[in-house]
Image: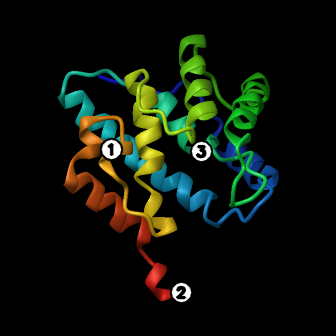
Amino acid sequence: MSQQAGEINYNGLHSYLKNFFKIDFMGMHGLPHWARVCKNGLDLIELEEALGHTPRTDVVYLFAYLHDHCRENDDEDYQHGAAAAANAVKLREQGYFEIDDEGFELLCYAMTHHSHGQTEADITVQICWDADRLDLGRCDIVPDPKYLCTQSAKRQDVIDAAYKRSTKGKEEK
């Protein structure tokens, strides 16, 4: 069974992110994306646990909501992952969430490297990266299995469900 999140000040963290985020909070890299990444991650955790892996739910959850929170724009922003990891140090110190040092190291690594195209890492980090990459439908990109890390994320039914979720409502705009 995956490790559950420690204490998270959900209301405080949400309020902080809403006030801190520099671009459209409801936009391409904002709250709706973070929520889909969280859903993708939780689905992948369940599938990977069935394969005998023990990913960390706390890391995947925090990654979902923090990985893009330091973006300066919706375009090329190569330092946003490292900036998110650096800011997470402050958020942890200020009591927005509690996580052990091992989990925090995984979280910071996942955030720092999430847009570098890597596929090899700890299973929890792989789930973080896959959860984000499965949400590429919002950019009109169908996720390609060769850029995904886990066997679970590479399943066509998983890709199809995530793509459908990430494009829901786009046709109405």
Residue 134 horizontal/vertical position (percent): 40, 52
| Nearer the camera: disc 2 or disc 3 | 2
Q: Residues within 10 Å of mark 1 (few under 14, many from 20)?
A: few
**At label 3, which amino acid type do we have?**
Tyr
Secondary structure category for the residue under label 1: helix
Cα–Cα gap, marks 3 and 1: 25 Å
Residue 22 found in image quarter: bottom right
Residue 81 horizontal/vertical position (percent): 67, 38
Secondary structure category for the residue under label 3: helix
Q: Residue at x 46, y 39 (%)?
A: 129
Tell me if 113 is positioned left or right of 76 in this view.
Answer: left
Cα–Cα gap, marks 2 and 3: 25 Å
- Residue 146 image label: 1
Residue linked to disc 3: 65
Q: Nearer the viewer, residue 15 or 28?
A: 28
Q: Nearer the viewer, residue 145 or 158?
A: 145
Residue 97 horizontal/vertical position (percent): 65, 29
The image shows residue 71, relative to residue 167, as above or below, that is above
Residue linked to disc 2: 173
**At label 2, which amino acid type do we have?**
Lys
